[in-house]
């Protein structure tokens, strides 16, 4: 079984701080389970959105200002979880992370026999 986390934020420093917290929590979780957990980090492409704002909507319509919003992302995969109980424990650890300013999506998967 594996657990995949998608982290997104407009501040790359917040992503790095959350990743450091996640690495420390993973090390503690691996110590509690008695097996080391593999943590793979993959950067996602930075999304850049641009907006054009009118400074004055009444008289000077040609006076505009452009604003840019960049969103950075990381995909973190916790692999080789030994059991469903370990997966539930990992999800609880991720829920307890204080990730202010970071959007966090959690997905898990398990191999199937086909």
Image: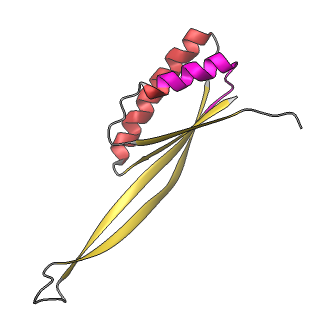
Tell which residue pokes out farthest to the left in this image. Answer: 59
Side of 101 where 5 appears, left or right: right
Seen in the picture, residue 33 relative to 103 is either above or below; the reply is above
| Quarter of the image that includes the N terminus | top right
Quarter of the rendering containing residue 68: bottom left
In percent of the image, x 10 and y 90: which residue is there?
A: 59
Query: How many numbered discs?
Result: 0
In percent of the image, x 36 and y 29: which residue is there?
A: 98
Side of 66 where 86 appears, left or right: right
In percent of the image, x 55 and y 23: which residue is there?
A: 90
Seen in the picture, residue 11 relative to 31 is either above or below; the reply is below
Quarter of the rendering containing residue 57: bottom left
Residue 36 seen in the figure: no
- Residue 61 sits inside the magenta stretch: no
Q: Main secondary structure of the magenta part?
A: helix
- Residue 85 sits inside the magenta stretch: yes
| Along the line of sight, the residue nearer the viewer: 21 or 60 | 60
Q: Name the colouring of the figure.
A: secondary structure
| Along the line of sight, the residue nearer the viewer: 60 or 75 | 60
Residue 15 seen in the figure: yes
Tell me where residue 75 appears, x and y as whole percent. Answer: 54, 43
- Magenta residues, as a range? 78-93
Tell which residue pokes out farthest to the right in this image. Answer: 114
Tell me where residue 28 appears, x and y as whole percent. Answer: 50, 15
| Quarter of the image that includes the C terminus | top right
């Amino acid at each position: 079984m594996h657990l995949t986390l998608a982290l997104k934020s407009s501040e790359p420093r917040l992503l790095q701080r959350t990743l450091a917290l996640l690495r420390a929590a993973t090390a503690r979780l691996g110590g509690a389970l008695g097996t080391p957990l593999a943590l793979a980090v993959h950067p996602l492409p930075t999304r850049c959105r641009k907006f054009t704002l009118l400074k004055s909507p009444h008289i000077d319509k040609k006076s505009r200002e452009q604003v840019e919003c960049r969103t950075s992302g990381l995909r973190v995969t916790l692999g080789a979880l030994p059991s469903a109980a370990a997966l539930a424990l990992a999800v609880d650890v991720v829920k307890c992370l204080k990730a202010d300013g970071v959007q966090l999506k959690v997905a898990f998967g398990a191999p199937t026999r086909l």
